[in-house]
């Protein structure tokens, strides 16, 4: 398992470096008027290519080792790994295409992530088997199409959720690493070494990309990277619950409640203002932290350096915010009631924190 992680890390780091050098003099960056732009200079958004190469190389090597070399690491990575590799491509390739052209509409990218979801359901066989609520689970047994629909919704939506929180150096990447490692822990607890190997490789590939992204901000993950994190984590979360009845379906829900709720809240916020949910703005939680908490920390005469320092200081706030949900999720991964209560508590705390930042009512130790 560890050797696959090493391969993923080195592959992602090297490919990201090659992409960085190739794209440095090309215009793969946000428009100057974009509300998501919190950097100075022309930064390529093609880190998803390095991530994809690192993940695919390690996954396919693990599959070949298991199928043709006697499975020396006892990973049991069958040909289903190859199906995962193919199924994730529509979403990720669509994201990279947007990073290259910046001309793919939200509707078209949503169609591509849904294509990945449909492949995962129809080809890979992923389905949400239960919700941990006996009155709902009885319906799902008699009407299995409910689980298929839930799987499609989860796989379609999570890539866009990661794209929403991918706003500052290291933010989405570290969140992805934390969640992958939490899923790995539970996968090992239930004896699923194959799934653990895929998740460790994903975390390692992300770390390989991260050495160029944080703190220097030399390359961004872009839509391709965010979609890749979302798809892989969605696949793994559904597979973990589907394969192991002892794992509560609310375990991955609590792990992912930050990007999921950020997306839901963002859609509601835009709907309440009468604008399209697909329209970009600068009112996400991480952007408010940058503007209201971190913005006054530095005062450097060099604009680029000042913005980079503020950018880097923002991400740790959200890493800590993510750990508030990851820790209880890992501790109570089989206890549905506790996990549901933690999800509800997060929603309440998120609303309180958001309103406090908007109204400038923050404790002094946060400022």
Image: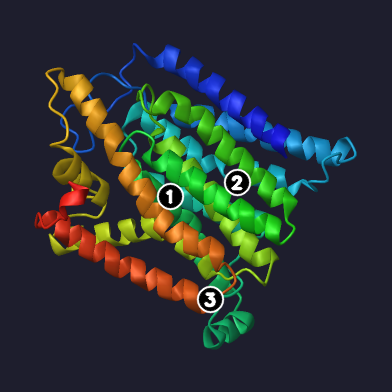
Mark 3: give few (<14), some (14-19) or many (20+) Cα within 10 Å: some
Estimate how packed mark 1 is, as few (under 14), some (14 to 19) or many (20 or more) residues with alpha carbons within 10 Å: some
* Residue 360 as seen in the image, left or right of residue 251: left
Question: Percent x, y for residue 9?
Answer: 59, 29
Q: Determine crowd level at label 2: few under 14, some 14-19, many 20+ residues with C-alpha closer than 10 A.
A: many
* Residue sitting at x 58%, y 40%: 202
Q: Is residue 160 left or right of residue 336?
A: left
Looking at the rendered image, the disc whose residue lies closer to the viewer, 3 or 2, is 3
Disc 3 on helix, strand or loop?
helix
Residue matched to label 3: 336
The number of numbered discs placed on residues in the rendered structure image is: 3
Q: Is any part of residue 226 visible from this angle?
A: no
Q: Is residue 236 above or below residue 268?
A: above
Per the model, the C-alpha gap separating discs 3 and 1 is: 32 Å
**Nearer to us in this view, 34 or 274:** 34
**Splitting the image into 4 quarters, where does residue 127 fall?**
bottom right
Residue behind mark 1: 111
- Residue farthest bottom in this picture: 135
Q: Position of residue 217 (x, y in %)?
A: 35, 25
Whether label 3 touches label 2, CB < 8 Å = no
Residue at mark 3 to residue at mark 2: CA–CA distance:
30 Å
Q: Which residue is mark 2?
A: 87
SS at badge 1: helix
**Image point 24% across, 19% down: which residue?**
41
x, y percentage for residue 66?
82, 41
């Amino acid at each position: 398992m560890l050797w696959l992680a090493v391969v993923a890390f080195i592959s992602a780091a090297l490919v990201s470096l090659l992409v960085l050098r190739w794209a440095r003099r090309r215009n793969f960056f946000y428009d100057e008027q974009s509300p998501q732009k919190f950097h100075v200079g022309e930064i390529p958004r093609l880190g998803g290519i390095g991530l994809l190469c690192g993940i695919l190389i390690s996954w396919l090597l693990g599959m070949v080792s298991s199928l043709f070399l006697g499975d020396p690491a006892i990973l049991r990575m069958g040909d289903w790994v190859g199906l995962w590799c193919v199924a994730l491509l529509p979403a990720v390739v669509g994201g990279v295409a947007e990073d290259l052209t910046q001309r793919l509409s939200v509707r078209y990218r949503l169609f591509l992530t849904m294509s990945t979801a449909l492949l995962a359901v129809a080809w890979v066989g992923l389905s949400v088997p239960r919700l941990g609520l006996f009155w709902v689970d009885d319906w799902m047994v008699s009407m299995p199409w409910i689980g298929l629909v839930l799987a499609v919704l989860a796989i379609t939506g999570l890539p866009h959720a990661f794209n929403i929180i991918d706003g500052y150096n290291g933010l989405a990447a570290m969140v992805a690493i934390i969640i992958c490692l939490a899923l790995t822990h539970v996968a090992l607890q239930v004896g699923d070494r194959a799934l653990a190997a895929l998740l460790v490789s994903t975390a390692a590939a992300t770390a390989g990309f991260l050495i160029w992204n944080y703190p220097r901000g030399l390359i961004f993950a872009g839509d391709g990277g965010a979609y890749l994190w979302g798809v892989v984590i969605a696949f793994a979360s559904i597979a973990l619950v589907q394969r192991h009845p002892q794992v509560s379906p609310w375990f991955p829900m609590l792990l992912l409640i930050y990007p999921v709720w950020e997306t839901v809240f963002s859609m509601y916020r835009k709907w309440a203002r009468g604008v399209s949910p697909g329209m970009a703005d600068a009112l996400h939680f991480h952007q408010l932290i940058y503007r209201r908490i971190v913005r006054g920390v530095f005062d450097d005469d060099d604009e680029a350096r000042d913005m980079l320092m503020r950018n880097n200081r923002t991400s740790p706030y959200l890493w800590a915010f993510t750990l508030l949900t990851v820790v209880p999720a890992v501790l109570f991964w089989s206890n549905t009631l506790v996990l549901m209560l933690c999800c509800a508590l997060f929603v309440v705390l998120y609303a309180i924190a958001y309103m406090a930042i908007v109204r400038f009512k923050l404790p002094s130790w946060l400022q």
